[in-house]
Structure formats: structure tokens, C-alpha cells
Amino acid sequence: MATGWLSHELYFWHDTRSAGGFLPADGRTIEPEAHSESPATKRRFRNLVDVSGLLAKLVPLEPRAATEEEILRCHTRDYLERIKALSAENGGDAGELTPFGPGGYEIALLAAGGVITAIDAVLDATVDNVYALTRPPGHHAEPDIGRGFCIFANAAIGAKHAREARGLERVAVVDWDVHHGNGTQKIFWEDPSVLTISSHQDNNYPPDSGHVHEVGGGTGEGFNLNIPLPSGSGVGAYVAAYERVVAPALRAFDPDLIIVASGLDASNMDPLARMMMHSDGYRQLTQLMLDVADDVCEGRLVVEHEGGYSSPYVPFCGLAVVEALAGTKSDIDDPYLDFFKGAGGQDLQPHQAAAIEAAEANLSRLAAV
Ligand code: ZN
């Protein structure tokens, strides 16, 4: 099995400015320190894959910048021009909680283009599957506004490329970032050719977004699934959600390509969420996606990076995902795993099962169309 690895040094140079967590430092109430969405988690993830010896066994993929035409498949011309102009000056904010420095436009183009490069590599059978460690993330970005650290909708831009440039009939985007994939949902709301599924902590970010009743509209009704999980959900809830909702939805939809928006912020150590996933949980979800991809789309699976804010722990979750993709296990074991495995409530709890059941009910819409 050949697994691709795509990243670029410039991804780590995207500048989110000083902050207190996810809010900008304001010189009065919030003392400045590194923004939550800093390069550290991603750089440490890349470095652990390197130190594990796995990086040398992966197929290196060099990202290209997305073209304006490719960005405009998901975003308005006004928005693109606004980002470009701010970037050419001193940077700014793409809309809501999305700071960037000078040159941020070009780095965002390289992130979106990286997902396109990864998709092309899988469709051209250069690799079987790929992990694209891109930055900035993309799943909160909406057509005319950047939100939640996301400038361009990388996964959605990739899905559009697969459909419009590569001629695929159906594409699925599965989002396991702990926050709702609102941007992806919005872009494909009325589009039955792209199935969008988001599992996330119920009502975390964006507020009032990602409810179970948001199922798409018009001809896209039934092709958008949300699985809002209660705060505190662990591996039991995640595996159940993926076995009972995500996998059956994918099998019913029968896509030609599966894109995973891989946020690693559902972990037990993440500062921006309250879930209890651990590296072995991510390994299980990845294996499940591989199994489904094998059955429905000849194994064509592109995993692209989204959030994940625990500097010590993101690397171990990420390594587990990449190991699963490559069908191997490195010599490095997760040193935190025993602490998290034994946490109370890791098994599926009744109120979590109820939330999953509510999402499962929407599968009948998918089966009916
Ligand atoms: Zn997130």
C-alpha cells in the first residue's frame, strides 16, 4: 500500500498573531500569547511522523497553489479580493476569528491547492491514500466570510475539483473535527452530488450550528448529516457514531472518493473542546474509513488536516491516523494512551447512544433518494 504525505514549510508560517486562546489580544484585557491555532501542534505532528521512521516510507507530495478559478468554485469574488488585498498590506482578519499576516493569501492558496494535489495523486493512482497536513484549516470558511481560523474551504474546494475538473459523479466529505463543518455544509447544502457528514461536540463552534435536523435543502435534502455528540463523548461514542451512521451513509451514497476533514481536537487533551478521544480511537475511525473506501471507491481516501490544539497530544493522534492509512505501526507507542483509556465514560453512554440514534434516523432520507 502506498500512502502519500503532503505538507509544506510555508503552512507553518501562516501567522495567526498573538491571542488569548481563540480571541485576539487586545492590549487591555487579554494578555498576548500564542494563538490556539499556532504552528506548534502541526509541526510537532510532522516531526513525530519523521522521528517514528514512517515519514521516510511515505510518498512525498509537493503541493501547488490553488488557482483563483478553483477558489471561486466555493467562494465569492469579493471575498477572494478582500483576502488578497489585506494579505498584500499587513494582513487582517478574514471575517470572524480568522487572523492572518502578510502573505496569508498565498499560504491559504497553497493549503487549498494541497488538498487538490492530494486528490489528484489518489485519482491518478500515484498513491492509494494520503494525509495532507495543510494549514490554515478550512471547514469553517463560508463562501463570503472566513470563520474559526479558516480562510478558504480546503476540503470543499477539493471536492469541487474532483467533481468539476476530474468528472467524479459523487464525493463524500466526512468531518471528524470536534467542531461543526459549517462551511462544507453551507457550500453543498443544495448539492446531492456531495454527501457531507460532520460529527462534532454539540453546540461548540460555531454556536447554534450543526444540529441533527440540518439535513440539506432543495435537491440536496438528505445529503447533509450532522452527528452532534454530547460533551464528554469518548471512543465508545465515536466508534458507535461511525459504525451506525457514517459507514452506512457512505455505503448507501456509494461515492467515488472519500475526503476526511481530520481535526484532531476531539482528544482528551484539547483546550478548545470537551471530548475524550485518544490515539487508538482515531486509529479505529481511520481503519473504518479505509474499510468503507475499499468497499465503495477502490480505497480512494484523502485525509486533510483541520483543527487540533493540544501541542503534546495532536502528534500522537496524527501518527495513529497516518499509521492506519499506511497499514503499519511504527515503533513509537502513545505514552499518554493508558491515562486516557481508563477514563470513566469512555464506553458508549445511554445519552450518547440517544444522540447517535437521532442522527441514524436521517439515514432513511439518504436511502429513499
Ligand atoms: Zn476544530
Image (cartoon, rainbow, N blue to C red):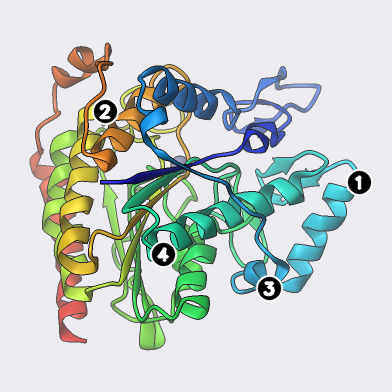
**Disc 1 element:** loop
Image quadrant occupied by the C terminus: bottom left
Point 69% across, 65% down: residue: 67
- Dot placed on the residue nearer the N-terminal end, 4 or 2: 4
Q: Of the two numbered discs 1 and 3 on the same chain, state the one appearing first in sequence.
A: 3
Q: Is mark 3 on a helix, strand or loop?
A: helix
Sequence-first tag of 4 and 1: 1
Q: Name the foreground residue: 201 vs 220.
A: 220
Query: Quick one: label 1 or label 2, which is nearer the N terminus?
Result: 1
Indicate the position of residue 142 as horizontal and vertical percent values. Answer: 59, 63
Rounded to the nearest angstrom, the CA distance separating label 2 from label 3 is 38 Å
| Position of residue 47 in the picture relative to residue 203 (left or right) | right
Cα distance in 3D space between marks 1 and 2: 41 Å
The location of residue 214, given as percent across then percent down, is 35, 68
Seen in the picture, residue 295 relative to 263 is either above or below; the reply is below
Q: Can residue 86 be seen in this view?
A: yes
Expressed as whole percent of the image width and height from the top left, the position of residue 183 reads 51, 61
Earlier residue among tags 4 and 3: 3
